[in-house]
Each structure stands twice: as structure tokens, then as C-alpha cells.
Amino acid sequence: MHRARLNGIRKVMSERGLNAFLVTNMSNVFYLSGFTGSTAAVVVTSEAAYILVDPRYSIQARMECGDGIEARDYTSVSTVEAAGQLINELKSDVVGYESENLTVASLRRLRRTTGAQVKLRSTVGKVEMLRSVKDAHEIALIKHACGIVDSTFDIIVREIKPGMTESEIALLIDSTMRRLGAAHEGFSTIAAAGINSACPHHSPVDAALSDGQFLKMDFGAEYQRYNSDITRTIFIGKPTDKHREVYQVVLNAQMKAIEAIAPGKTGREIDAVAREYIASCGYGENFSHSLGHALGIDVHDGPGFSKSSNIVLEPGMVITVEPGIYIEGWGGVRIEDDVLVTDTGHETLTTADKRLIRK
Ligand code: GLY
Ligand code: MN
Ligand code: MN
């Protein structure tokens, strides 16, 4: 598995005329090597691949990385200096680095270590491009992570009642996900009630739920390094016609966009399905973010559905679909599911109830 992924990077290297590739983004390091620690770098050449780790991770790297990659320890230098020394030893003279990850200070350190004879070439999104199409093993892990959030919603929705605070609800969600096997939350859980639900990424506070409020909950489970990401919005008390209308517009937009997902479509086409529908209902100004993002090792795993997305959908991509309507001083609704692109269309991986639930 890792050997095939390393060969994917070697293909990019030969296209770009690189004889080594330095990987410093830790999600990319994990993808190429299987290493789960927090600090390392991978150096790939046409014949070999190395993972550089400090002594905290020597044993772990040897246990986790086997397939086509050699673990080497370094001490007394920084990770990029160790990488620079290895590049010198390998006599690689045209080296790609990940410019979206390597800091300016690290790049300077790398330059100082390798010297002027080594040409350092900026690259963007090369490993991420390989990561965008998931294999069967990755899809199985994402499905498992989706099962955890589906079951979590089923459980917590029964326990929510007026008087609970946003913070209590977030804690209930997090502890339930952990009990169901999540390694941890994929991101800080959002629980937003009433006017707070108009903020797309509100942080829970000690505000108590009361009648006449939307409660928007956005949470994700990480399972064996892969993520799920779901949003459900429920209602406390009896919704007005306007609450019902806004909810239904978001739900219709989401279902129309999911229905349109198929190989060959572009990211912007799918975004437009939801965006144009919401605008036709008079809420265009209130849908302020992109429709969705790729999902995998990272919660935000790469480009997905947006006004400017050029990605062309391929079987194996997993992308969220999460339209929202946010009205300042009133409230907001978002509904989010995780969708796999299949050979013939799509499969929705999160299946928790989307009818407007009242508590
Ligand atoms: N919770 C972050 C997102 O839905 O993208
Ligand atoms: Mn989310
Ligand atoms: Mn999301």
C-alpha cells in the first residue's frame, strides 16, 4: 500500500524533474509511511524512501513503517536539518518541498544545510492530490467514523432538553463519540443555540437552551486516523412558519446537491446546485460559505464544492455537502453529510435523521 503511494510521488517527481521530494506535512507523512507520531519528515528518491525521526519515535517508526521506507534517527539537529543532511548524503540536487507546510524559517535552515548546489523547488498539493481519491481501506475507515457520528446523534438527540447549555451538549456529544470508539473529536464540537446558530463556527458557551431556538450541532469522529463530519439542526419548542421554511430550504438544497454528485461533474457545478436553489428562495445572501470540502485523514482534506472549485469528481473521493442559511440576530440552519463518489453516482455515508426534530 505505502509502496504504491510512494510510487505516486515518484511519478510527480519525474514530471517535475525532481530527484528527491521532502514531505513535512504530517498528514502526508502518515499517508506515505503509516507513521502516526507528531514529528517526522519523509524523503523520497527514485529508488528509496526514508523517514527521519527523533529518539522519541525510533521504536514506533520501525514498528509502523515497513513497506518500502527506511526509518532513520536523528539527534541534536532539527527535522529539516536532518533532512538536509540526508539530501547531501544522497547527492540529490533538485529537491521538491511542500511550500504550504514548510515555514520560512525551516526553508532557510534547509537551505543553509544543503548549500547552494542543491536547487529547492516549491511544490503545492502533490501528496494531497494522491490523497483525494481514497482506496477501499480508507473508505472503510471513513464509513466507520461516519457510523460513530450517526449513532452519536441518535443517542444524544434523545437526551437533549430545554435548560441544558451548549457546553453540556458539546460534552455529551464528545463523550458519546468516545464511548462509541472515536479516538477523539475531529475538531472542536459546535453546539449553537438561538441567535448563536447564525454563526457558522460558534464555540459552545454556558447559554441554556430555551423554547423557540434552533440548536445546530456540528461534530466529527476520528477513527484510526480517518474522519467523519456531520451537522444536524434541531428545534427547541414549536417552530414558526419561518423556522420551518428556512429548515426546508437548507434541506432541499442539500438533497439536490447530493443528487447531482457523479463522476465527471466539477466542484463548482455541485456548489451551484445548492447556491442557486437557496438564492431562488430568497436566501442567497445568507449562505456565506462553500458547499463542502474533501474529508479523510484531515477533516478539511482538500478542495471540494465551492464557487471556484475546478476539481473533477472521481470515484473514491469523499466530500461533505453542508449548505447553511444564517440570519444575524435570528438564527441559522446547517445540514451536513459526507458523500462518497462512486462509479455510477454517489453514496451518502452519514445517514442520521434529517427531518426537523423538535425537543
Ligand atoms: N466543522 C467544520 C466543517 O464542517 O467544515
Ligand atoms: Mn462539520
Ligand atoms: Mn464540514
Image: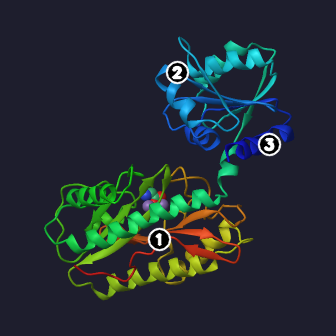
User: Quarter containing ligand 1?
Assistant: bottom left
How busy is the neighbourhood of tag 1: few (under 14 within 10 Å), some, or many (20 plus)? many
Three-letter amino acid code at disc 1?
Answer: Thr
Is the residue under label 3 in contact with that under label 1 (CB below 8 Å)?
A: no
Give how far apart the Cα atoms at labels 1 and 3 are. Answer: 34 Å
Which quadrant of the rendered structure holds the C terminus?
bottom left
Numbered label attached to residue 54: 2
Q: CA distance from mark 1 to mark 2?
A: 39 Å
Q: If you read the primary sequence from the N terminus, does the residue marked by circle 1 or circle 2 appear first?
A: 2
Distance of label 2 from label 3 (alpha carbons):
28 Å
- For the residue labelled by badge 1, is the local secondary structure a helix, a strand or a loop? loop
Please report the residue visible at 73 percent of the width from the left and 46 percent of the height from the top: 4
Q: Quadrant of residue 12?
A: top right
Q: Is residue 66 above or below residue 302?
A: above
Label 1 belongs to which residue? Answer: 350
Read off the residue under disc 3.
12
Q: Secondary structure at mark 2?
A: loop
Q: Position of residue 122 (x, y in %)?
A: 73, 33
